[in-house]
Image (spheres, rainbow, N blue to C red):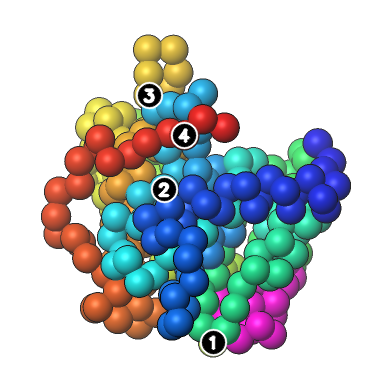
């Protein structure tokens, strides 16, 4: 579906208060920093008609102190290319300010070679599109951060969790090194987590329901678990300071996840 710039802007700005609800809309004398998320359905805010499907971006604020707001612009089905082509990166860059962070996670839909509106080749066009996020954030005094795509739930016949993203994580790692950008390697710890949990237990973290067996999208426990990985990586890579994070070792109730009406 092709959207006009006005439609994209209206939709994106309508979603931002949901991400910022915990911090309010009043501007303090000292402006809060904002962490923007550009990504796909694994990170995106979900609404009541999609419950219990949950993106990790919804759970990320549980692990961040109130001085750091989250503006989740991730959208279902988008790739690094289609997010730009629809004007969604422009919306983020219009809002982002010096000192803010832009976390970029794409890969799931970049892999779809049968869809020219989304497909990127890992070692060429994927990196070319990701550079637009890096350059745009830097030009506005914000800090870009790359995050490798979180792993799907896939096990081989021996019960080993197997990677599903081909060369895209390696390409992103190489780009981060070339561009001297912080990298959150979410693929590796998520794959290790699924391996530790095993084939049956991981069903409790993905959107498995009576009518759906979804090995890509998360339910509340899965979104919370992946958000914890993201927050820990932000701390480990020095993107955030210890004062910016909280609850990394605490149990987070599933009831904290809510699905607003669209």
Residue that label 4 marks: 260
Position of residue 136 measured from the top left corner of the image (x, y, whole percent) = 70, 77
What residue span does the magenta drawing correspond to? 126-146
- Answer whether residue 137 is magenta in the image: yes
Q: Residues within 10 Å of mark 4 (few under 14, many from 20)?
A: few
Q: Which residue is mark 2?
A: 58
According to the picture, the residue beneath numbered tag 3 turns out to be: 208
Q: Quadrant of residue 7?
A: top right
Q: Nearer the viewer, residue 73 or 147?
A: 73
Which residue position is annotated with label 1? 180
Instruction: Label the magenta part by its dominant secondary structure.
Output: helix
Mark 3 is surrounded, within 10 Å at the Cα level, by few (under 14), some (14 to 19) or many (20 or more) other residues, namely some
Give the image location of residue 193, x and y in percent: 27, 50
Disc nearer the start of the sequence (1/4): 1
Relative depth, front residue between 236 and 16: 16
Residue 196, compared with residue 178, is above or below; it is: above
> What is the CA distance from the residue labelled 3 to the residue labelled 2?
19 Å
Report crowding for label 1: few under 14, some 14 to 19, many 20 or more residues within 10 A (C-alpha): few
Residue, far top: 210
Specify whether residue 76 is in view: yes
Camera-side mark, 3 or 4:
4
Residue displayed at 66% across by 64% down: 92
């Amino acid at each position: 579906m092709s959207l006009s710039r006005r439609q994209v802007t209206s939709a994106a700005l309508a979603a931002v208060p949901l991400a910022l609800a915990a911090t309010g809309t009043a501007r303090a004398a000292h402006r809060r920093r904002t962490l923007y998320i550009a990504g796909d359905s694994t990170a995106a805010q979900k609404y009541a008609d999609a419950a219990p499907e949950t993106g990790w971006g919804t759970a990320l604020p549980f692990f961040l102190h109130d001085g750091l707001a989250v503006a989740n612009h991730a959208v279902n089905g988008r790739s690094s290319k289609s997010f730009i082509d629809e004007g969604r990166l422009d919306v983020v860059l219009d809002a982002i300010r010096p000192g803010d962070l832009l976390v970029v996670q794409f890969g799931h839909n970049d892999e779809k070679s049968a869809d020219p509106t989304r497909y990127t080749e890992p070692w060429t066009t994927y990196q070319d599109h990701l550079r637009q996020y890096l350059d745009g954030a830097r030009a506005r005094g914000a800090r870009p951060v790359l995050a490798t795509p979180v792993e799907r739930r896939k096990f081989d016949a021996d019960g080993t969790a197997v990677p599903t993203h081909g060369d895209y994580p390696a390409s992103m790692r190489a780009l981060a090194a070339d561009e001297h950008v912080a990298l959150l390697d979410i693929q590796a710890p998520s794959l290790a987590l699924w391996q530790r949990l095993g084939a049956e237990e991981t069903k409790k973290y993905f959107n498995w329901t009576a009518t759906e067996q979804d090995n890509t999208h998360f339910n509340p426990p899965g979104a919370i678990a992946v958000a914890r990985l993201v927050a820990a990586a932000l701390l480990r890579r020095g993107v955030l300071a210890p004062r910016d994070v909280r609850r990394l070792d605490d149990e987070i109730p599933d009831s904290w996840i809510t699905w607003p009406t669209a």
